[in-house]
Amino acid sequence: MINNLDKILKKVEKPVRYTGGEMNACVKNLEEVKCHLAFCFPDVYEVGMSHLGMRILYDLYNRRKDTYCERVFAPWIDMEKIMREENIKLFSLETKTPLHDFDFVAFTLQYEMSYTNILNMLELGGVPIKSADRGEKDPFVMAGGPCAYNAEPITDFVDLIVMGEGEEVNLEIVDCYIKWKSENKTREEFLEMVAEIDGVYVPKFYKDTYNEDGTFKGLEKINSHAKDKITKRIIKDLDTLTYPEKWIVPYMNIVHDRVMLEIFRGCIRGCRFCQAGYIYRPVREKSKERLEELAEKLIANTGYEEISLTSLSTSDYRNFHPLAQSLISKFKPRNINLSLPSLRTDSISMQLLKEVSEVRKSGFTIAPEAGTQRLRDVINKGLSEEDIMRACDFAFRSGWSTIKLYFMIGLPTETYEDLDGIVDVANKIVDLYYAIPKAERAKGLTVTVSTSTFVPKPFTALQWCGQDNYEEIKKKQDYLKSKLTNRAIKYNWHEPETSVVEAILAKGDRRLNKVIYNVWKNGGKFDSWGEFFSYDRWMKALEEEGIDYKYYAERKMSTDEKLAWEHINVLVTKDYLKSEYEKSMRGEVTSNCRQNCSGCGAACMGTGVCFERNEK
């Protein structure tokens, strides 16, 4: 315990980030548990507490009497300064236990730009940063999440990595740990035991090799317990899963301060740039009845006034309209809002929009991703300009006057005509608004155009593509600034420097471990926050290791080239991704999974066909 915590917290911004004690937080007696686990989110409290995966696993672990999971977040700069001055180790919220006293220190890898925070949290918590330096009494450092599908750039720092959905595999790891502990075996023996669990990757049991030209050659197994392929874990029936019914309610505003109902996993669409759309296949849905039950319990147990339906494409839920209308009818009388993110504009009902907007109205968001139909076909977006305009017309006539549009620049085959298409779409939406009689639309039109830079990601159809160079990205952003001049249009953009580093880390191999370590040693942390990110620091660290960043970010790869993440099996085959890549270069589209099975390989539980299609 920390004796002078109250005194310290008076000196920092947002002290409730570090107090714990929130409603529905789990409290246990440490002497009664056999496995003590720290769930670490490598960002500040208000970001981490908005993460659904953390809430699910926190609840899952703590349902076991023999296991206690606590939360740990990255301290903000002011708090870190005091902790270092006072020699206070990074601690958990629930019991204020230092990180080094846990059995497991588990990080979720949600975005590449959090990697330096992982090193910083380990060091602050008194845990040796590198796996090779940890002794028998040190915690096991584990990781999971979307970036785990290519965790090679941080393999020096983690002991084991979980691939896929964690509800079953994480409990198997706990069982393995308790058994190992009772048998008084060595640290190495535990890693050998856990390496035999499906979906668990132990990096130290493999050695990276390279060709004479510096390209990646492959991983060699150096331990007999290592697998040739690590296959992701998936849950077949989501209705049978436990789901948190008592949501922790923070004392401060967080990014997503609401009840989140996960309605299904996976995606039927196949957007070729979208990593989540591939790695979370196949589609599995929760029943309408189960979701209604969870909504009632979560509202009763939290007091929240908003329910958000979450998935990669919410309106693709097969019972979407009946579910949404049922929740609206139940909760609108209580002034509880229903939030519908990730809607596709080709399936929106005007009546549903009107019903949702009657309780509380926020901005209306559409993600066309590209400005022309040609480029939308390249990325297989499955969205037409007619769909976009019809959705905006519905929104304007339903009382919305704030439209947010998300696009990417630097997509493969992009031309300046495609950038002109972004401008054209935005201007047409403005014209559409003013074409509606004043009595039928809300006041104060704002159309916000936001562009991010395309980052090629592992396990996507565009993983072999290079990223636009820094100068070209800036040039395209400046071009859009000069064209988006209508007063009703606001233009936001992501700084290209961050996107370049993200691309390097996304497609990186083990040679980047030293780069990340050197960036952290030179002050790198909170790299996803613009005020702390330093492009020069990253470029200097790469140069010191003799690495040309263009090798990872800008280089177009051969589809026959060995990939640094090829030892991971996400079920979607490399041949399928290669086929989709070739179709993208020809501008050919692939229909969604419900219209026609395209044979991606994500056959659930080895049935040979997609679980959803097999169900019919």
Image (cartoon, rainbow, N blue to C red):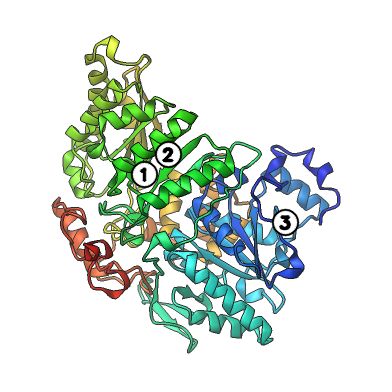
Whether residue 565 can be seen here: yes
- Quarter where residue 555 is shown: bottom left
Amino acid residing under circle 2: His
What residue is rendered at 29% in x and 25% in y?
483
**Farthest residue toward the bottom?**
224
Circle 2 residue: 494
Which of the 4 quarters of the picture holds residue 101?
bottom right
Instruction: Verify CB contact (< 8 Å) between mark 3 and mark 2.
Output: no
- Residue visible at 28% across and 40% down? 344
Q: Residue at x 72, y 56 (%)?
A: 91
Q: CA distance from mark 1 to mark 3?
A: 36 Å
Mark 2 vs 1, N-terminal side: 1
Secondary structure of the residue carrying numbered label 3: loop
Instruction: Give the amino acid type for the residue marked by disc 3 in the picture.
Output: Phe
Which residue corresponds to mark 1?
A: 453
Residue in the foreground of this view, choosing between 328 and 16: 328
Q: Is tag 3's residue or tag 2's residue first in the polypeptide sequence? A: 3
Viewer can see residue 532: no
Q: Is residue 352 left or right of residue 250?
A: left
Q: The residue tagged with tag 1: helix, strand or loop? A: strand
Q: Nearer the viewer, residue 615 or 233?
A: 615
Check contact, mark 2 vs mark 1: CB within 8 A: yes
Q: Quadrant of residue 426?
A: top left
